[in-house]
Amino acid sequence: MPNKGIKTRGKTHPTVEQPTIFLQARNIHKQYEQNVILKDITLEVHEKEILVLLGPSGCGKSTLLNIFNGSLKPTSGDLVIRGERVIGKNPHSVTVFQRTSCFPWLTVEENIQFSLSHGFWKLGDKDEIREKAANALKRVGLADFGNHYPHEISGGMQQRAALARTLVADAPLVLMDEPFVGLDEQTKELMHMLILDLWAENKKTMLVITHDLDEAIFIGDRIAVLSARPAQVKDIIKVDLPRPRKPEMKFWPEFIRMGKFLSFLTEREVIKAAQIRVADLNPNALNIGVFTWIGIAPFYIAQELGLFEKHDVDVKLLHLERNDDRVAFLLRGEIDLVDTTFDQYLRDLIQEPRLKIGAFLNRSMGGDALLVKEEIKTMEDLRGKTIAIEKGWVNDFFLRYLLDKHHINPDEIRMVDAKESDVGGLILQNAIDGTVIWEPWLTNIRHLSPTHILTSTAQEPILIDALVGRQEVLMKRHNDILRLIAALFEANNYIREHQPRSAEIVSTYLGLSVQETEEQLSKIEFFAHKENHDYIDKKQDQEPLITTIAQKLESVLEKETELHYKKSEGDFFYTPLLFE
């Protein structure tokens, strides 16, 4: 049969088959008095998939699983399975716990038979119970150990017995709470393969909890990344590895790339969960807050090529996706510098007038765009439409800038606050008509949905990234920051001269293909000393270029009534860094 799709402007988008939803967690909240464990968890588990919940120790993963199996009641929120709300014990699930849950007074075979003679999955025929238990033992490689007691077999064998006891029940949902914790690496790998083989036989829906990155990638179809407590869903990552999974896949570039990406995504949450101040981890390092976007490529290049070491500066990157977090960390002194946009810097001056720019890093030349449904042809068509942005962040500003330029009142648009990682799903569900988004999200969403770019920073190059810090930090760490800028500018020059190799390096950190990364790098103009001086130097009787840009930005910010923005006075820059 021919591939059916939606024809749009000469390109065909394949029809996206929507997965069947097995389980829905709707705004699950759990707290004990004032101690919040889970905060508004909203999550979908698809039929026949393996969804992995990945999060730091103590974040609330087990609490969430106990709500899913019905042994714990949420403070608020709903659990829905196959369209029906579940109250109390979940009759659709079985659970494999962290520690082996075999009864010590029963043999291995009697433990398995117990699960078939009690509870939701009770069978009446004793012969059928014996037959199923024997088959389960054989399936997990314990056929010769049925008469042994749990203490007479190894830890790995005990876990296999617990797995057999759970999976012998005919439940459509299998919940696993870090079932391989404490096992040695070889036994753990065997258990991974056993789980995947059992899943392939009957395709039961599985939800697996872990804090092991490699385990999450190897087992899962998707990975839901949880924040530190109170747990929230930070991101959901699709694992694009073929099945059946094989141990040698762990050495594939795609596997390694995803591991690095998850490591950067989860690092901040691990630190937060451990209640360690970032600044205390390495007091001599320059701690820099960044966010996921193609413009931070020079940091990765400098790291991989040893440019920080070459320039004798110790650098620690901390991924802070929420702007509120970046500003808070900066003001508390937990980071020294932040990579942010010039418009956001102007906003942040309201909270902290001592902020100064150490250097400009890049300009978006198509890396940010207004992405809309195909039927929207002009800016005028936006009136009455629903557009997703992250309120108070760069895409919020860029949308307001575009509306202002086309004399459209923001009140004529319905703005929806949404995370970048959620926007693709909102478009596919027809919940929104468009979004302002940046790379790498921009390319991903265009691949998935029948949308087009209405306008971008290729036509409106107003978004510039800057390295920002408090003036006292810039003065105190002057020499270190000078060396940092030198390393970044060298990395920027490397990207210009070696874009294919740069794409190989950066793709590993962003979880993208090399081709996608190279395409996205071409949408960014990376700055060095010359470009910085082009922006900040006066030319004859003309104001510096950055002053003109600032005036355009401030004219938009002044119209945000909730912001109470006042034009800044004085210089934006800590000029010694660029004029030495």
Image (spheres, rainbow, N blue to C red):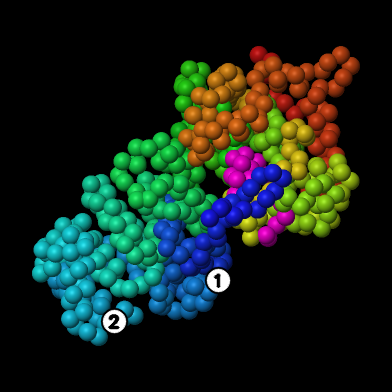
Quadrant into which the C terminus falls: top right
The numbered disc on residue 77 is: 1
| Residue closest to the eye, 154 or 384 | 384
Residue 222, x across and y down, in percent: 46, 53
| Residue closest to the eye, 522 or 320 | 522
Q: Is residue 482 placed above or below 570 in the rendered structure?
A: above
- Give the residue drawn at x 48%, y 68%: 22
Residue 328, x across and y down, in percent: 62, 44
| Residue closest to the eye, 58 or 177 | 177
Badge 2 amino acid: Lys
Q: Is residue 126 placed above or below 503 in the rendered structure?
A: below
The numbered disc on residue 122 is: 2
Q: In this image, 20 relative to 143: left or right? A: right
Region rendered in magenta? 430-448
Q: Quadrant of residue 414?
A: bottom right
Q: Circle 2 sits in a helix, a strand or a loop, which is it?
A: loop
Q: Is residue 34 visible?
A: no
The local crowd at label 2, few if under 14, some if 14 to 19, many if 20 or more residues have their Cα within 10 Å, is some
Residue that extends furthest to the front in the rendered view of this protein = 1
Q: Circle 1 sits in a helix, a strand or a loop, which is it?
A: strand
Q: Is residue 17 visible?
A: yes
- Give the residue drawn at x 23%, y 47%: 186
- Give the residue drawn at x 18%, y 60%: 141
